[in-house]
Image (cartoon, coloured by chain):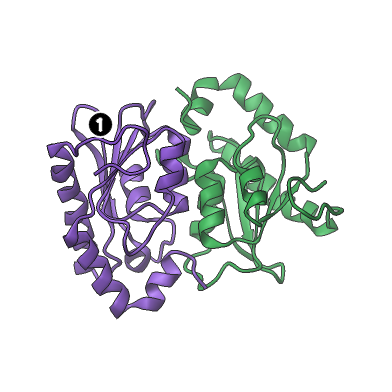
Chain colours: A green, B purple
Amino acid sequence: MSAGGTDPRATRGDDRELLGIAVAEARLGLAEGGIPIGAALVAANGSVLGRGHNRRVQDGDPSMHGETAAFKAAGRQSTYRGTTMVTSLSPCWFCSGLVRQFGISRVVIGEARTFHGGHDWLAEHGVEVVLLDDPECVGLMTDFIAAHPALWHEDIGAD
Amino acid sequence: MSAGGTDPRATRGDDRELLGIAVAEARLGLAEGGIPIGAALVAANGSVLGRGHNRRVQDGDPSMHGETAAFKAAGRQSTYRGTTMVTSLSPCWFCSGLVRQFGISRVVIGEARTFHGGHDWLAEHGVEVVLLDDPECVGLMTDFIAAHPALWHEDIGAD
């Protein structure tokens, strides 16, 4: 389903495939002892420009969320027009600000049940937002938050 | 002067000192061939938790703006309550989202003449915003943008 945009539409089949990349990144992070959130930045032609996952625990780096890791991995780009950021979890304000500032055209989101970030704001500002409400993504975060609530709160700046 | 908040007030003397750190970082970046924007994250007691500057050119890393570099350098923190982000230039949406998500309490800005980011939005959401309108900061960015317009546009995602 599509959320918040002006033109709700059916999910493209390849959005589910793109989400698979984000989920694979999330699972990599979990296997490393980290927070299981992953993302990828994908060009208009479907090629993956960059992919990554949250690295707070692994690198002691609070600036590397799934989306910022994917953005960094993509390196310098002259434009983000036509790109899609696919992420296993609704983007927080930091990552939503990234999408808005750089003009990323679309955001495909695994789930927004365990955390509702800034994706409505992005839709209001012309970003195409696709919310897949994926049960695997919900399960990953539900289990993680139950097991590590303090770490999760730290990652989103919740006192 | 204070901008956007509900309680305009005189600038604290130490905000000018804090800005000196951000400007020193901006000048370091310029000397390295980079974009001259610097920042620091400062604790409520005045201690500098982290400082840094834009590293797009130096590291080929589009995710390291002045503010994100300072945030990363501060490492993991359990809370950002009472902290100040001082930056030589108005924070873009990416860096404004960072401030909002992590609950950074204050933002001290060198100038917003050459680039107007999300600081009004931050003030609307309860962040104390102090805009110093510093001539040295204006000069740094005016000269840089004139000399390297394409690089500057790349840094803010302007096509």
Mark 1 burial class by Cα count in 10 Å: few <14, some 14-19, many 20+: some
Q: Which of B36 and B51 is in front in this view?
A: B36
Mark 1, residue position:
B43
Name the side, left or right, on which A145 lies relative to B77: right
A51 w.r.t. A3: above or below: below
- Indicate the chain on which mark 1 is placed: B
Q: Quadrant of residue B18?
A: top left
Residue B125 place in picture, x, y as percent: 46, 35
Q: Nearer the viewer, residue B24 or A135?
A: B24
Residue B82 place in picture, x, y as percent: 31, 27
Q: In which quarter of the image is residue B153?
A: bottom left
Name the side, left or right, on which B96 lies relative to A91: left
Whether residue A99 appears in this view of the structure is yes
Secondary structure, mark 1, is loop
Residue B19 place in picture, x, y as percent: 19, 48
Q: Which of B29 and A52 is in front in this view?
A: B29
Residue B72 place in picture, x, y as percent: 36, 44
Q: Quadrant of residue B61?
A: bottom left
Q: Which amino acid is tagged 1? A: Ala
